[in-house]
Amino acid sequence: MKRSIICLANSRKYYERCIAGKTPDTYEWIRPVSSRANEELLLSQIKYADGQEAGLLDVIEIDLKEEKPAQYQPENWLIDEQAKWKKIGNFNPSQLDTICDAPKTIWLVGNYNDRVPEEHWKGHNIKSSLYLIKPSSFYLRREDFDPSSGPTKKKIRGVFDYNGVQYDFRVTDVKIEAEYLKKAEGRYTLNCGDVYLCISLSEPFEKMDNACFKLIASVIGV
C-alpha cells in the first residue's frame, strides 16, 4: 500500500532514525516503523533512490505493509523494507498553521512534565503519540549535567511555553543535535520568525519504570 506523508520529524532513535508525518489529504499521523526489535529505521531505509535523506517538509511516498499500532504509539505502520521511498513534493512552510494540532496539554503536566508513567499509558486510551504544535516561546539548552542523575553525556533540551504551561523535553531532532552538541553549555534561541515542534511519545523505558518520555522529535523554524 502506497501512502504519502508530509515529513514532520526526522529524529534519532538509539543510533538510527524515527520518521513521522501527516498525510497531505486528511492530515492523519503516520509513523513508519521497521521490523527490527525496537522498530527504528536504518539510515539506508529513509534515503531516496538518489541517495538523499528524507528531510523535514518533504512530501514522501512510502510503501507500507500493515498497521502496527502500540498502546503508546497508535500511529505506527510497518514499512515494506524492500521498497525505496520517493520524494514527490515539498510542503509550503507558510501552511504549517493549518496542520497544527491543538491539544490542551502535552499528555500530562505537573510532576510528570517530561514523561508519561506506565500506569497512565496502560490505563488510558492514548489516542495520539504525536503532536505538531506552535509554542508561544522556545529556546534550546545544551547541557552536560542532569540534576536527577549527575554528570551525563552531552544533550540538548528544548524549553517552551504552550497553553500557559512551561515544558522541558529532550530534543532528538538529528539536525539540531548535530549543530548544537558542538556548542558550549548554555541557552540558545533560534534565529527565525516562528517555531513549530513535533512532539513524540517514546516507547517505554524499562530502566525508568516503563515510563514513556515526551521528546521534541523536530524543531521547524520558519
Image (cartoon, rainbow, N blue to C red):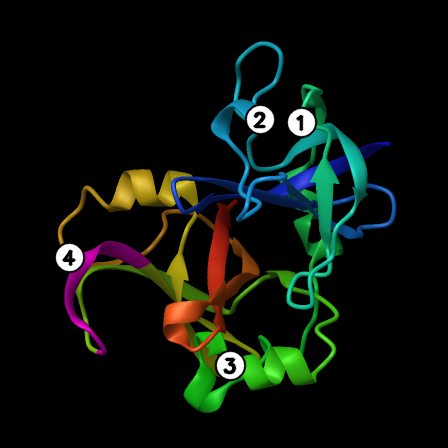
The vertical placement of 144 against 40, above or below, is below
Q: Is residue 162 left or right of residue 5?
A: left
Q: Quadrant of residue 167?
A: bottom left
Mark closest to the chain's N terminus, 3 or 4: 3
Residue nearest the viewer, comparing 204 with 20: 204
Q: Is residue 200 left or right of residue 160?
A: right
Going 53% across and 49% down the picture, which residue do you hit?
A: 38
Q: Where residue 25 appears, x then y in whole percent?
A: 87, 43
Rate crowding at label 4 as few (under 14), some (14 to 19) or many (20 or more) other CA atoms within 10 Å: some
As shown in the figure, which amino acid type bears the numbered disc 3?
Pro
As shown in the figure, which amino acid type bears the numbered disc 2?
Gln
For marks 1 and 3, give the CA distance: 32 Å
Residue named by callout 1: 81
Residue named by callout 2: 45
Mark closest to the chain's N terminus, 1 or 4: 1
User: How many numbered circles are shown?
Assistant: 4
Residue named by callout 3: 117
**Is label 3 or label 4 in front?**
3
As shown in the figure, which amino acid type bears the numbered disc 1?
Glu
Give the residues in magenta: 148-156
For marks 1 and 4, give the CA distance: 39 Å
**Contact, mark 3 vs mark 2 (Cβ under 8 Å):** no
The vertical placement of 48 against 60, above or below, is above
Residue nearest the viewer, comparing 155 with 148: 148
Mark closest to the chain's N terminus, 3 or 2: 2
